[in-house]
Image (cartoon, rainbow, N blue to C red):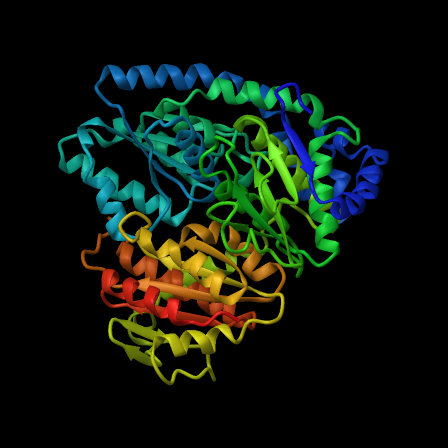
Amino acid sequence: MAPDGTTVTIVDDGLAAKAAPLVDKLVADQVASKLAAQDPTLWGPDAESEASIRLSWTTLHKSSRPLIGEIEALREELRGEGIDRVVLAGMGGSSLAPEVITSTEGTPLTVLDTTDPGQVADALAGDLQRTVIVVSSKSGGTVETDSHRRIFAKAFTEAGIDAASRIVVVTDPGSPLAELAENEGYRKVFLADPHVGGRYSALTAFGLVPAGLAGADVARLLDQAAAAAQVLGEDSADNPALRLGAAWAAAHADGAEKVVLADTGSGITGFPDWAEQLIAESTGKRGTGLLPVAVEGPTAPGFADAGADATPVAVGPQVGAAKITTEGPLGAQFLLWEFATAIAGRLLEINPFDQPDVEAAKAAARSLLDNPAALEGGEQPSTVDDTVEVFAPEGMSTDGELADVLRSFLATAPEGGYLAVQAYLDRLDDASASILRAELAKRTGLQTTFGWGPRFLHSTGQYHKGGHQNGIFLQITGAVEQDLDVPDRPYTLGKLQHAQALGDGQVLREHGRPVLRLHLTDRAAGLAQLVRAVQEVSER
């Protein structure tokens, strides 16, 4: 147990017995202390080059301290000018941690991790006179984030506001965004530690700057992480990170390659969504890995009735079916789960710091954007049922109503497989789509994930292509009523969103995975129709 009470408990006796020898081996190999010392040899010679430039996250509780004063000074400066509304444009690791931090503390932050025109328009409709936008991209070339920057810069200018004075940048040194920010004279540029990968960046400028500007106590987060770091680097069987990583690996070896995450009263808001990216993108490669399944709570389908292919993990006290529990404050949990994920990578014999399959979907989307004819008119629906156009996998029956189509599709799932629901919609106005996860899980018995597109492409998207190849994919796209131009780019947000959905579907099919796309010609009516159809699907 860390001084702040951070603990991992393996509740299931059988799992604890299987994890124990792995923990002993990790202790004997001094894995915890070597990881804390940033030893890049822990994951084998093939991973050493990448690991050597990806381990600075282990000491961020110390190295990020200078950011606290910089963030507070900028916040006070902005407040003095009447600027108190913070919008974050970022994807994946650049948005998930700040969203958890601010949601947990109850501080308002508008997060843009979407290409849906409606959701971006809603953010634009806020009071621009009071708004600063944080443009956050490690590479400096993230297409979604660049689109947000362009759209907001134009909106500021049209409102008579000096756009450069309202744009704050977080990026790696030497990135195209860093260069652009200098040339354009943006308000402030925070250069993050380049030796930290995006999904491990919660305690870097990527996590701390937007959260701190919004009013979160980021110094407290670093204090919490520092307290946990005292035990996470110890070669001891009581080290919670060794216990958590070993339990995941032991379960995986026993056929449970899915990790079902539920909050059980941790006091942290949205932690499973952050952990989902960390685990999926770090471990889902070379045909193996851990599929995180974020669920609604400990009584949710998939957690309460988890089968042999899944391990229920409670974020918070032990409740119900949980086989593992983790407790502790947010800053400590960030560091604990990062340590545990890196340790699990060693045990699974994969490199937890690369993401070899993420680029494929991006390349496919770019190709479609470069070929408007293919994007606009190439694909014809297999069938249409009222407000839902059906684009079915080749050879799948589309006879009957939408419920019949869903039954045919769900029958393509292999034993022990999973269903991924991917909603390329507005996660605020179309929020009701999220109920599909529990409904489908309950009726199919399949472990079922839910992701908002394109946000999930920066997290579970890696696992979908690189992890266990036993998933089936339900894509939901929707008609765009009012599109948004992306200034100085030959596409709109709606076209970009459409290209991302089709591009990812194309890559999944190339991996031999079934993809069913349902296009809602009327979003509200189509979602209601889809929910009714799902409810007609019989339980297995």
The quadrant of the picture occupied by the N terminus is top right
Number of callouts: 0
Horizontal side of 34 relative to 73 (left or right) equals right
Q: Give percent across and percent down for residue 470.
A: 60, 66
| Residue reaching furthest to the front | 320
Looking at the picture, tell me which residue is in the foreground, 129 or 233. 233
Q: Does any portion of residue 369 appear in the rendered image?
A: no
Q: Where is residue 407 in the image (x, y as percent from the top left)?
A: 45, 76
Q: Quadrant of residue 371?
A: bottom left
Question: At x 75% / y 44%, what residue is drawn?
Answer: 13
Residue 3 lies in quadrant = top right
In the rendered view, tell whether residue 467 sits above or below residue 371: above
Whether residue 61 can be seen here: yes
- The image quadrant of residue 94 is top left
| Residue displayed at 38% across by 54% down | 434
Identify the residue at the far right of this view.
Answer: 28
Q: Is residue 71 left or right of residue 306?
A: left
**Which residue does the image show at 37% across and 14% down from the upper left?**
73
Q: Which of 472 and 295 lies nearest the eye of the viewer?
A: 295
As drawn, 322 above or below 308: above
x and y percentages locating residue 183 in the rendered image:
34, 32
Say if 425 sits above or below 55 in the image. Answer: below
Q: Position of residue 213 (x, y in %)?
A: 36, 24
In this rendered view, identify the residue nearer to me: 27 or 539.
539
